[in-house]
Image: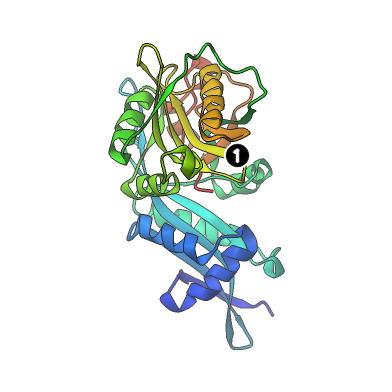
Amino acid sequence: MKNKYTIRPREASDFEEFVSLRHKVFGDDAEFIKFFDDCFRDAYLDFLIIEDQDGKDVLQAALTQFEMGKLIVPGNKASEIDGRSIEMSYAICTDPSARGNGYGSHITVYAREIAESSRKLSMLSPAEPSLVKFYEPLEYKEFMYAEQGTVTLDEQADFGLSQPSFEIISPEEYNNYREAILKNRVHIELSAGALRFAAGSAEGGGPDDGGAGLLLIKDGVSALPLAIAACEAGEPGSLAAAELLTFSEDGGHKELGIAIAKALAVRCGAKRCDYMMPSRSGSETSAALGMISASYEELAEVYSAATSECPPYMGFTFG
């Protein structure tokens, strides 16, 4: 006889068991989960699979669904999904002892159906490329792309930069620059919660803070804006530009982005900088970081690789 289980929202009494599962699968701790809760406040739900084992409720799987923002389609296109709110399925996890029972698929479909019942789009970001094939049968399609890489101090990546300047900017300023940069590319306009998360993760501002901060990078001679970046202190000796957007090429000037990533590492005394930025048209090195639950017809209305358009860009992966 199969075990019985239900899917329901997380309750206050589930917190310790929920943290234990997230820590076991992802290494998250209570402090990070409380930070996430505070950022998204009432704009998210944690769904749990609770299995009845001989009269005892056991947490076997979980999924967090939060409001990431809304889909923005450039003004030269008409689409019914333009402006739709996006619910992001995040931290999909199953207890290692319970894998192989279909819990991951079940809770993912459940969250998608909840989002779609309110005419919202459901998205997720696979933790690794191999999981794309896992989510495709659950009605998700590859749609959001980005370039990810690492630059070290010994690489030739200066792009002729003349000692760039770095200015700490507010979350509101960052968001305004972000929207101006991405206006001609299909992208996600961040929700208030997503912006709070990005700003909180990048809290800091100077080299003494590990280089963290929301930054505006300008040319040192002309003072022209070159890029914006949301930087997080990484492991000792490393920096993570969780998002790096250039003011040229709709955010995706790769050579300039790599040079700026190197300059960011120099600024904070790191040996390397991991970065993520939008992909160029026709890029052979971009990775599918976002999958979306919309029809092929709807997606074809807003993006076509055949016409050399810039690929859709999601932004932060919230990992």
Classify 153 as above or below 44: above
Q: Which residue is mark 1?
A: 238
Going by the picture, which residue comes out furthest to the front? 208
Q: Quadrant of residue 236?
A: top right
Q: Is residue 42 visible?
A: yes
Depth order, front residue of 254/56: 254
Q: Measured from the top left, where is residue 246 in percent x and y?
A: 44, 22
- Residue drawn at (54%, 45%), measured in percent from left and top? 125
86, 273: nearer the viewer? 273
Image height check: is 104 above or below 191? below
Residue closest to the eye, 55 or 295: 55
Q: Position of residue 311 (x, y in %)?
A: 49, 25
User: Residue flagged by tag 1: what amino acid is it?
Assistant: Ser
Which one is nearer the viewer's eye here, 116 or 127?
127
Q: Report helix, strand or loop for mark 1.
A: strand
Q: How many marks?
A: 1
Give the color scheme: rainbow, by chain, secondary structure or one colour: rainbow
- Residue 279 visible, this angle: no
Q: From what the image shows, is residue 215 above or below residue 98?
A: above
Work out whether 219 lies above or below 180: above
Residue at 69% across, 64% down: 99
Q: Residue at x 52, y 18 (%)?
A: 281
- What is the quadrant of residue 20 in the picture? bottom right
- Residue pictured at 55% horizontal, 74% vertical: 17
Q: Residues within 10 Å of mark 1 (few under 14, many from 20)?
A: many
Q: Quadrant of the N terminus?
A: bottom right
Residue 89 picture location, percent across and down: 49, 52
In the picture as drawn, the residue positioned furthest to the bottom comes out as: 55
